[in-house]
Amino acid sequence: MEPPAQPRRVTIVDVARHAQVSTTAVSKVLRNAYGTSPKMRAKVRQAIAELGYRPFAAARGMRGRTYTIGVMLPDIRNPFFPEILDGLTEALDETDYQVLMGPGCNGEAAEARVTEAMIDRGMDGLVLIAPVSPRSHLEQVAGTVPTVVVGRHGQSAVYDTVSDDDIAGATLVVDHLVGLGHRRIAHIEHAETDPARMREMPNALRAEGFRLSMRAHGLADDVVSTTYTQEGGYLGAKKLLTRAERPTAVFAGADIVAMGVLEALDEARVSVPGDISVVGYDNTTFAALGPISLTSVDQAGRHIGAEAARLLLARLTDRGKPSAQVKLTPSLVARRTTAPPPA
Amino acid sequence: MEPPAQPRRVTIVDVARHAQVSTTAVSKVLRNAYGTSPKMRAKVRQAIAELGYRPFAAARGMRGRTYTIGVMLPDIRNPFFPEILDGLTEALDETDYQVLMGPGCNGEAAEARVTEAMIDRGMDGLVLIAPVSPRSHLEQVAGTVPTVVVGRHGQSAVYDTVSDDDIAGATLVVDHLVGLGHRRIAHIEHAETDPARMREMPNALRAEGFRLSMRAHGLADDVVSTTYTQEGGYLGAKKLLTRAERPTAVFAGADIVAMGVLEALDEARVSVPGDISVVGYDNTTFAALGPISLTSVDQAGRHIGAEAARLLLARLTDRGKPSAQVKLTPSLVARRTTAPPPA
DNA sequence: TTGAAAGCGCTAACAG
DNA sequence: CTGTTAGCGCTTTCAA
C-alpha cells in the first residue's frame, strides 16, 4: 500500500508546476536573485514548503555554486582545531553555506588528495588549517578555488591568511617566566629543516620568538629539538634533566609536548612547579583539566575561525579582491604549573 | 604571456578526443564497467594521465554516484571519535570513495541539518556516529541513502549498526574493582529520560550493565545521575563525597567525566588511588597521558570504523541486502588510578 | 565492443 | 518582471 521507499526527489520542476511559474522563477527565488516580484516570491516559497523541496546541491554545482565550504584539518586529534571550527561554523550558520571537513591528513600527499577531492566536488571555497604542503601547491589550489589558509604565516597574493602571532606568544611565555624570577629557561621545539617553511610554520616562529625574547632579557636561549608530540616532550625533558645545570622552567612548544614533559618530570620525581615550571602552547581543552592545570598560551581559536569565514565569504563575493593577512594576538593563561623558581 | 589562472577544467570530452574514442568509452574505463577492450583501456588511461584528468564528482553525481561518503559526528572534541575515523578512512583508502565529515552537531536539529546537507550533496552513503535523533528520523535517512549507525544499539531493518558491548564494558569495570577488593562502588551516569533511547544509548547501557554486575556480585548499586561532561563528573563526585559512607571506587561513564571526578577529589584532598579508585570509559588519548594515567575501557574504535566501512561498502553494492548488527567487545586498560581500597 | 544521443537538476543568457 | 532555451560534465540507454 505504502509508496516505495524512494518516491523520487522533488525537483525544481515540481515546484514550478505546483506554483504555476517557470523553473527560472523558482531558481531566482532560491538564490534571492534580482528580478522577482513579492507576489511571485510568496507563491514559490509556499510551493517549496508544501512540497518539502530542497535544492540538489550537486546539480546546482554544475552551473553555479554548491554552497559548500571545505575545511581541511591536518589532525583531528589536535584539540586546538575544534575551536577554529566552532568559530567558522558559527559565522557560516547564518548563510546558505554548509561546512564539510576532510579527514585528518598528515603530509603533503594526503593534503593534496583532500584538496583535490574537495575541488572535484565543486566546493565553493576552502579553508586550509595549518597545511604543510609547499607554497606552490597552496597557490595552485587557491588559483582554482577561493582559499583561506589558517595557522601558517607568510603571505600570498592569491589566498588570504589568518594566523596567531606566534612570536608574540613566545614572548608572553618568556616574560611570564622571567617575571616569576626564572633565568634558566629551556624551550622544546618541533625541528624545522625546510628553509621555506622556517618562515611560515608556527613552530619555527615560536622558537624564534623564544630566542629573540630570551636575548632581549640578556639570557641564554636553550633550545632542544624534538617534535610536537607527547613523546617528543618526554624525550626533550629527559635530555634537559641530564644537563649539568638544569633549567628551572620549560617552555613546551605545544600542550601535547608539555604532557610528555610532565610525565618525564613525574618519573624523575621532579616536582612541578616546585622544582621546575612548565608552560604549554595552544590552551587545549586538557590544559584546563583539573589534574593537569597547565599554564598555556591561548590562540583565540574561535576568532581565528570567524575571521577565516569572513575572509572567505568576502572572496566568494569578489574573487578579485586583494588578499588579506589577519594576525591575531594570543594571551597567556597562567595556571598551576608555573611558580617562582626554587630559592 | 601565461594563460589565465583558470584554463578551464579538463573534461571527459577532452580525454575522449585526445584518445580518439567516444566519451562513453572514457566513462566506462573510469568506472571499470563492462565492455571495454584492453587496448581501449590502455589508450584511455594514457590520455587521462597525459592530460591530468580528474572526473568532476559533482557532475558524476547527477547520473551515477559521487564517490563520497559522509560521516556525521556529534562532537569533534570527543577524543574517541578520531579512532573510529581512522578505521573508516583506512578501510576506504583502497577504494574510490572519499570521506567528508559534517561539523560537530549537538541535538536533533543540527543532526537533521547535517544529514540533509549530505543527502542534498548526493553522497553515496552515510555513517552516523552516536546520533541522538529519534529512530524515525534515522530510518528516513536510511531510506534515502545507504546508512550505517555507529555507537548506538537497537537494530533496524533499513540501516546497519556497529556498536561496542557497553553492558560488557561496565561488567569489566565492576569485575576489575571487585577483584581489587572494592565493595562500595559508585557510578556516575549521563541521565537518560527518553524511554525509547534508554535501550539504545550507550550511556544508558553502561549504567544498566553496572547495576546488573553489582547485583551479580551481591553489592549495592550506587548511581549518581549527571551528564557526560567534566562538570558533570565534578558535581557527581562532590555529591559522592557528602555520602555518610563514601565509596572506595568511582566508575565514571566516560573519561571526560573522570576528569571532573579527579578534579573534585584533588580539591577535597582525597588521594587517588590511595583513598578512592577512579575508572573512566573510552580510553581516550588523554586517559593515557602521563600525569593522568586513567584506568579506562577501550572500545577498539579502529575496528568499529573498519566494520562500519565494510558494511557500508556492502550495502553500496547491494542496497537490498538484509541489515546487519555488529557488536564488538571492549577491553579494560588498567592504569594508575585504580588500586586496592584503603585497609 | 563501440558510439550517438538523451537526459540528471539546476542556472544563466536572452527574449518577450 | 517573467519565461524559453541551451547547456554544465557525466552516465546510460540503445543501436550499430
Image: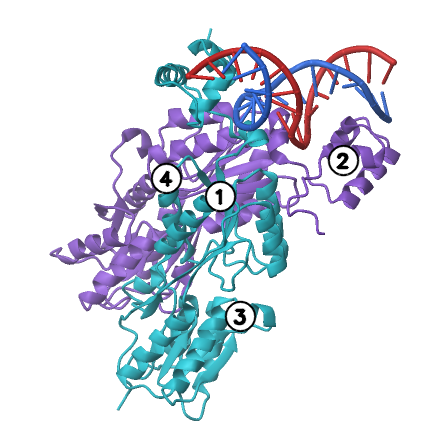
Chain colours: A cyan, B purple, C blue, D red
Q: Is residue A102 left or right of residue A300?
A: right
- Residue type indicated by callout 3: Arg
Tally of marks: 4
- Residue type indicated by callout 1: Asp
Subunit of label 2: B
Q: Give the residue number, with chain letter if any, for mark 4.
A: A93
Q: Give the residue number, with chain letter if any, for mark 2.
A: B14
Give the mark nearest the N terminus, 4 or 1. Answer: 4
Asked if marks 2 and 4 touch (Cβ < 8 Å), the reply is: no
Tell me the residue at 49%/64% (across/down). A153
Labels 2 and 3 share a subunit: no
Alpha carbons under labels 2 and 4: distance apart? 39 Å
Of badges 2 and 4, nearer the viewer stands 2
- Residue B151 in view of the camera: yes
Tell me the quarter of the picture where residue B49 sits. Answer: top right
Alpha carbons under labels 4 and 1: distance apart? 20 Å
Residue B201 location in percent, x, y?
A: 35, 37
Subunit of label 1: A
Disc sitting over residue A318 in the figure: 1
